[in-house]
Amino acid sequence: MMRIVILTGAGISAESGLGTFRDKDGLWTRYDLNDVATPQGFARNPRLVTEFYNARRANCAQAEPNAAHYALARLETALPGQVLIVTQNVDDLHQRAGARAVIQMHGALMSALCAACGHRWPAPPVMTETDPCPACAAPRTRPDVVWFGEVPYHMDTIADAVARAEIFAAIGTSGQVWPAAGFAAEARRAGAHCVELNLEPSEVSRAFHAHHYGPATQVVPAWVDTLLPT
Ligand code: BJW
């Protein structure tokens, strides 16, 4: 059973050089989320949205996992079968740090999705919205990410894991986007010990029993050490 469920957000990848969304220099201060993170925005201007994700894919390819990603992978190795990472991030830094039990609930930059037939394939570094689908040939390629108004991926598996968790932790997430923002309250109701690790209190910090505030590269390895057998 997944005893420890860990929700991660953009803050865990901030020290790898990938921008967050809602911080002072975050992506949503430079882009209107209605333009680049909604199905309506994509329908209006698919080129703009595709280029936004092409640029983020290029940044991600150059970024390296940091000490927080490695600490979580170390936890998974030390407690096999007991740790599940549910990430809102579309980067692949958890996997590159060595974590295997990772659910990307908001999709993946490195994946392409056919809007016509639902087929997925590895995204080329530079995608265009008219790339033909390898399965059905429709020229309706989109980034394989979950925009506002769309249903996040693997919700049944996540809900089950959250309901059964003994420990639920949220790392580097502002608690402003649902349904992820509600996981801590759900886990707490079901009896989990809930821990928040973030630079500052999130919007939902009251749902947590314990708080560790500071940069992820410092607070996450220290917290992981407390869970490991001595
Ligand atoms: C550090 C740090 C360091 C910085 N160390 N920490 C209920 C109420 C109200 C609204 C809704 C609701 N339910 C649904 C909605 C609507 C909507 C929503 O939430 N709207 C809000 C704006 C109010 N939600 C949806 O539409 C979702 N779909 C949905 O609900 O479907 C219905 C349904 C659900 C379940 C079952 C059945 C049906 C979809 C949401 C999709 C979000 N998509 C995005 C973009 C996609 C991919 C991408 O481009 O990357 O996902 S938006 C963006 O926000 C991205 C992120 O994954 C997500 C969360 O952001 P995150 O990770 O929290 O980042 P930040 O920047 O907000 O915070 C960073 C934090 O890190 C900060 O706190 C910093 O302090 C901290 N930090 N440096 C540690 N070094």
Image (cartoon, rainbow, N blue to C red):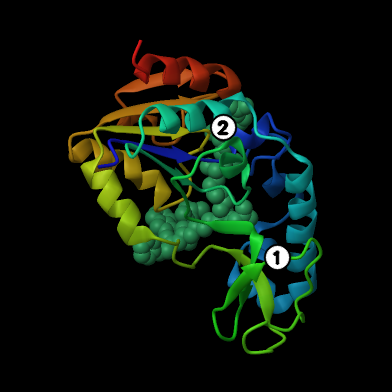
Q: Quadrant of residue 162?
A: top left
Question: Residue 178: horizontal and vertical position, in percent?
Answer: 42, 52
Q: Secondary structure at mark 2?
A: helix
Instruction: Say above or below: 209 vs 180.
Output: above
Q: Are marks 2 and 1 in contact (CB under 8 Å)?
A: no
Q: Quadrant of residue 23?
A: top right
The alpha-carbon separation of the residues under discs 2 and 1 comes to 23 Å
Mark earlier in primary sequence (2, 1): 2
Q: Which mark is residue 69?
A: 2
Instruction: Say above or below: 102 vs 33.
Output: above
Q: Which mark is residue 198?
A: none
Q: Amino acid at mark 1?
A: Ala
Instruction: Say above or below: 170 vs 227.
Output: below
* Residue linked to disc 1: 123
Q: Amino acid at mark 2?
A: His
Instruction: Say above or below: 134 vs 84.
Output: below
At 60% from the left and 80% from the top, the residue drawn is: 115
Q: Is residue 156 left or right of residue 98?
A: left
At 68% from the left and 48% from the top, the residue drawn is: 28
Q: In front here: 172 or 35?
A: 172
Q: Is residue 183 left or right of residue 103?
A: left
Q: In front here: 174 or 13?
A: 13
